Image (cartoon, rainbow, N blue to C red):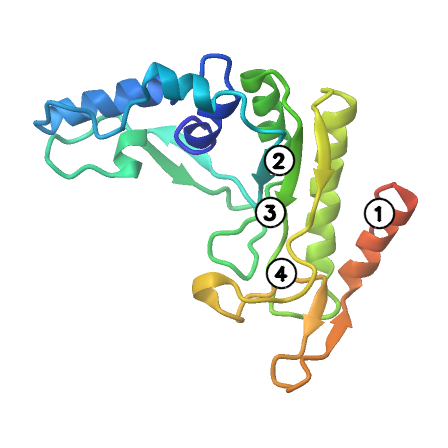
Amino acid sequence: MHFSLGWFANPIFSLKGNYPADMVTTITSNSVREGRSWSRLPSFTDKWIETIRGTADFLGLNYYTSRIVEPISSQPDGPNPSYQRDMNLKFRIKPEWKKSASDWLYSVPEGIGDILRWIKAEYNNPPVIITENGWSDEGQIEDDDRIVYLHDHLKHILDVILNDETNLKGYTVWSIIDNFEWAQGYTEKFGLYHVNMSSPRKERTAKKSSNFMRLVTTTRKIPKIN
């Protein structure tokens, strides 16, 4: 968590500022093992720690999926540093996790609750807006898997609001329409609305999931699903 979210959030949201202490210690130690007299992780001056700390109105969180992490027992010596090597972890998935149309995206709804509770504990419960959360498929109108994904994640979000009193202020789905997805282009579909990419007019058609989210926003409840 410190090597991913904490890398960016800790300087802004923690009480002391700066990078997470274990991140500083680990990278400094690895840098020395690699024959360096300096850490590969740039250091903050006291001025910049104070300048950056507390400079956000809210924490914007993109959440799609999770991984199980396990420590690696030992790291080989050598001059080849990497982000993954500094973390000293290996990542795996559980076979029961449902896979999307994206190689990296599995449905792990409990993960969104875990990360919100972690943010509350680590950063004194700052305001959080979930700025992206979504599911990819092949663009079908009857997108039941997306509905299940959204339903299950919203249930965990509601749980941490009501039972853990996390300071969650907003939630947005990725995405309103099928769109350009970086290296995957238009081959992976995240939208609540289908876009006809073969037509000059690019007609848009509401998917089943758009009706689900319409009920969420109009009733302020999470609809039951079969």
Q: Mark 2 or 3 closer to N-term?
A: 3
Q: How many marks?
A: 4
The disc label shown at residue 83, or none? none
Few, some or many residues within 10 Å of mark 2 (<14, 14–19, 20+):
many
What's the residue at 7%, 27% (across, down)? 35
Looking at numbered disc 2 in the image, what kind of residue is underneath it? Ile
Q: Nearer the viewer, residue 131 or 44?
A: 44
Q: Are marks 2 and 1 in contact (CB under 8 Å)?
A: no
Residue 17: name its quadrant: top left
Q: How far apart in space, not on screen, are marks 2 and 3 (Cα)?
A: 10 Å
Q: Nearer the viewer, residue 61 or 115?
A: 61
Which residue has dot 3 on it? 107
The disc label shown at residue 216, or none? 1
Q: Position of residue 206 (x, y in %)?
A: 78, 68
Q: How far apart in space, not on screen, are marks 2 and 4 (Cα)?
A: 18 Å
Q: Position of residue 163 (x, y in %)?
A: 76, 21
Q: Classify mark 1: helix, strand or loop.
A: helix
Q: Classify mark 3: helix, strand or loop.
A: loop
What's the residue at 83%, 59% (across, down)? 211
Looking at numbered disc 3 in the image, what kind of residue is underneath it? Ser
Q: Which one is in front in this view, the residue at disc 2 or the one at disc 3?
A: 2
Q: How far apart in space, not on screen, are marks 2 and 1 (Cα)?
A: 18 Å
114 in relation to 92, above or below: above
Looking at numbered disc 4 in the image, what kind of residue is underneath it? Phe
Q: Nearer the viewer, residue 97 or 142?
A: 142
The disc label shown at residue 190, or none? 4
Q: Mark 3 or 1 closer to N-term?
A: 3
Q: Mark 4 or 1 closer to N-term?
A: 4
Which residue has dot 2 on it? 112
Q: Mark 2 or 4 closer to N-term?
A: 2
Q: Mark 3 or 4 closer to N-term?
A: 3
